[in-house]
Amino acid sequence: MDIREESLALHKKLKGKISLGVKTSITSRHDLSLAYTPGVAAVCQEIANDISKVWEYTSRGNWVAVVTDGTAVLGLGDIGPEAGLPVMEGKAVLFKEFAGVDAFPIALRTKDPEEIINIVKAIAPSFGGINLEDISAPRCFYIEERLKKELDIPVFHDDQHGTAIVVLAGLINALALTQRKFETTRFVISGAGAAGVAITKILLSQGAKDIVVLDSKGIVSVGRAGLTDIKQWLIQHTNPHHTEGDIADALTGADVFIGVSAPGTVSEDMIRSMNKNAIVFSLANPTPEIMPEVAKAGGARIIATGRSDYPNQVNNVLAFPGIFRGVLDARAPSITEEMKLVAARALARYVEKPDEEHIIPDCLDKGVVQIVADAVKSCIS
């Protein structure tokens, strides 16, 4: 069977990938009295008298809600909350397997940002953190910002920040190998959605000054009309030379290409037009903007993809389990920009001897979670 058929068979056999586990057994009336009534009433009263004790007496401190509306699922688009549920279950598996975090999928049958915000705020008392997942742009930016302001627990949109953290980690090592600095490197980002915007922001935080961003209509530039608020923000913070045109225009003379857009949008000739020792992060999945062998033929020196069958897989599992492990352990109220930067730098340092095919850790390396968690906790005074 191919991977598609195998995955279908696995999900059908198991009827999903997660189940509820319990920490205490009920084998006697005494056990029942401790776990439930009458003993549990004392625990409820303790929390009622001091709400902070919820972290001591319940599982809340290790629970994360994985919330979606099913509008931007993988590369499949708006397929609805039910169809997005297998991805949310998969996310819960990764949280548990890599970081020991208990995560629960919440699929919402609404696309209304205000309704999503209100629902998440209403369920927040059950959770130590909120992971937003597969919510389409530009709504995802607004939803996350509102929830960050209005909740006292960490909120993280993994499609944005998980991707950005791992991309930055890879670029730190890739630029070092090609003897470049962020301040003088020209970056081209194809994709102005959740991931593209977050990558832009984290590159700016790392010192990048020359970034050109493209959407489906071309370079995001001053001459464009009818742009969303987030694209207006991009105009203010990117494209310092006021470049206009399409992706071929953007890539001419560029040092780094980062694709978070659509398959087959970049040609060998476009890579050839880039500067020597070009760096290509072609991350559309499963089919990238340009296949690695074609990028290599065009002269790219370092290539990363979102796929597991090529070197340098950019996989969010390198970031989000450790991020949440760190903030949950420290009971941090939020995930800061500093945490994202130090997490990326820790990931880059974790690769002891970077080379063209090893610029980021292996996504199955279980040691990654702790170094990311420790980096996050170092930001908390």
Image: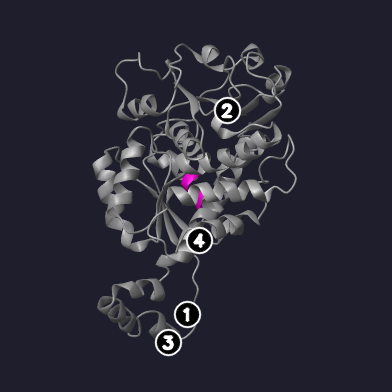
Coordinates of residue 245 in the picture (x, y in percent): 46, 11
Q: How crowded is mark 2: few (under 14 residues within 10 Å), some or many (20 or more)?
A: some
- Residue at label 4? 377
Q: Earlier in the sequence, mark 2 or mark 4?
A: 2
Which residue type does callout 1 highlight? Ile
Q: Tally the marks.
A: 4
Quarter assignment of residue 54? bottom left
What secondary structure is marked by label 2? loop
Which mark, by number, is residue 29? 3
Q: Residues within 10 Å of mark 1 (few under 14, many from 20)?
A: few
Which residue type does callout 2 highlight? Thr
Q: Earlier in the sequence, mark 1 or mark 2?
A: 1
Looking at the image, is 235 positioned above or below residue 30? above
Coordinates of residue 53 in the picture (x, y in percent): 35, 75
- Which is nearer the eye, 20 or 218? 218
Which mark, by number, is residue 185? 2
Coordinates of residue 44 in the picture (x, y in percent): 30, 78
- One can see residue 16 in this view: no
Which residue type does callout 3 highlight? Arg
